[in-house]
Amino acid sequence: MNIPKTSFPRVVIIGGGFAGVALAKKLAKQEAQVVLLDKHNYHTFQPLLYQVSTGGLEPDSIAYPIRKVLQNFPNFYFRLANVEEIDTENERVITNIGDLDFDYLVVASGSVTNYFGNTEIEKNSMAMKTIPQSLNLRSLILENFEDALLTSDLNERNALMNFVIVGGGPTGVELAGALAEIKKGILPKDYPDLDTRMAQIHIIQSGDRILKGMSENASKKAEDFLEKLGVNIWKNVRVTNYDGETVTTNGELLLNAKTVVWAAGVKGETIKGLNSEDFITRGNRMVVNEFNQVKGFDNIFAVGDVACMKTEDFPHGLPMMAQPAIQQGEQLGDNLIKLVENKPMKPFEYTDKGAMATIGRNKAVVDLKKFKFQGVFAWFVWMFVHLFFLIGFRNRMVVFINWVYNYIRFDREARLIIRPFKNRNIE
C-alpha cells in the first residue's frame, strides 16, 4: 500500500463512517500513524439519505471527501480499499490492493441492511444505506411515474404509483413524510396528465407503534402527522415476501407496488477473520468490553454499529445510531494513546443526547433527556442539529440554502434521473 514505516505505532481503522472519522480526528495530532481504509473515498451523512432519494438534496451535499477531513495531518494516510480478511495471528489486514500490518486495529465498518435471510425480498426491494442506493431509489421513483403515463392498465398504473415502506423507524417515517409531501405539492405539477391522487404510501410496522425507540407520545404524534399527510400505517403486520409486484404479509394484507423500500433493520458488517461465533452476537455485531476491545483481543477494537457494547440500560448493545458511534470513536482515541503510554484506559460511558425524527414541513418529534416536544419548534431543532453535525462549511451552506428554497417554493428540484436504475444491489 506504500505506507511508510515509522517508529510510531500504526493504527489501522476500517471504515470512514461516524465512528471511524471521529477516531481518526482524535488521533491525527498524536504520535501515531493513522491509516484509514474504506471502499468509498467519502464520508456519508446517512441521516439525510432519504432527502437524496426524494430529490430534496444532491448527493454531494451530504458527502465529504475523507482525505479532506484530515488533509493537514502528516501522520494520516487514506487508502481506497475493500477489506477482505483480518489475519489476527500475524496482525495483518488483507485487502484488494494489498496487505498491511498493524499494531492496533479498529473495526468501524458500520452496518448493512438486514433482510433476515429472505433472499426474494433482498432481490426485489430497495435499500437506502448508501448514496448509490439512494440515487437508485430516486431514479426508480421517477421512472415509475414516467411509466405510469404510458400504461392504460389501471392496476399497473396504480402499482407504479404505490410505495410500500417496510419498517417504522426514523428512516421509514422520514421517507414516508417526504414522499407524502411530493405527492401533495410536486407530482400534480410535474404530471398534470396523471391522476396522482391515486398514489398510495404505506408504512408496514411489525410492532404495535412506529418510532419504537422514542417515547410513546412522540410515536403517537408522528403517527398523527403521517395520517394527516395521507400515509397508511399498518401496525402489528410483518412482511413475509415481495416478488417485485405484490407485498405479502403474515395476515390478509396484500399490496401491489412497484416500489418497496426495506427499512426494517440493519446488521453489523463484519469481516472474515473476525466473524467467529465466539464474539459475534445478536444483529451480527462484535462483542466488545467497556474499552471497545473485541472479546479475546488486546489490540483489536470495534466501534460504532458493528460493535455490541452491552450495558445495564442497553442489554442488547448500544443503539446503532450516530451518537454512540461518534462518542465511542472519540473515547477510543484517548484510550489508544493511554494504551501506548502504558496508562490505564477509561471505560466508555454513553451519554444519551436524545432522538428525533422529521415527518415533513413544520412537523417533527424530539425526545431529549428532560424535554419532549413536537411540531414546528421540533422541526427547527431537527434542522439545526443536522446542519451542525454535517462535515464541511460548504455542505452546511448548500443544505441550508436548499432547505430554505424548498420551504419557500414548496419544491424539490433535484428530482433528476441522472442514471437509469439498473442494479438494485449497488452499494
Image (cartoon, rainbow, N blue to C red):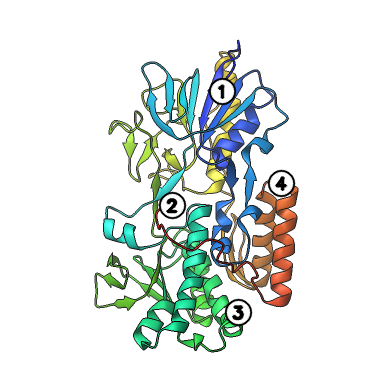
Question: Looking at the image, is 307 positioned above or below residue 408?
Answer: above
Q: In the rendered image, which residue does mark 3 sit on?
A: 186
Circle number at residue 276: none
Q: Which mark is nearer the camera, 3 or 4?
A: 3
Residue 199 in view (yes/no): no
Query: Residue 136, image x and y in percent?
Result: 48, 60
Q: Nearer the viewer, residue 385 or 240?
A: 240
How many numbered marks, from 0 up?
Answer: 4
Query: Residue 50, image x and y in percent?
Result: 54, 62
Q: Which mark is nearer the camera, 1 or 4?
A: 4
Q: In the rendered image, which residue does mark 2 sit on?
A: 426
| Residue type pointed to by label 3 | Ile
Circle number at residue 392: 4
Q: Are marks 3 and 1 in contact (CB under 8 Å)?
A: no
- Determine the residue positioned at 27% across, 34% down: 277
Label 4, residues with CA under 10 Å away: few <14, some 14-19, many ≥20? some
User: Which of the marked residues, 2 or 3, is nearer the chain's N terminus?
Assistant: 3
Residue at disc 4, secondary structure: loop
Circle number at residue 336: 1
User: Which of the marked residues, 2 or 1, is nearer the chain's N terminus?
Assistant: 1
Q: Nearer the viewer, residue 206 or 95?
A: 95
| Residue type pointed to by label 2 | Ile
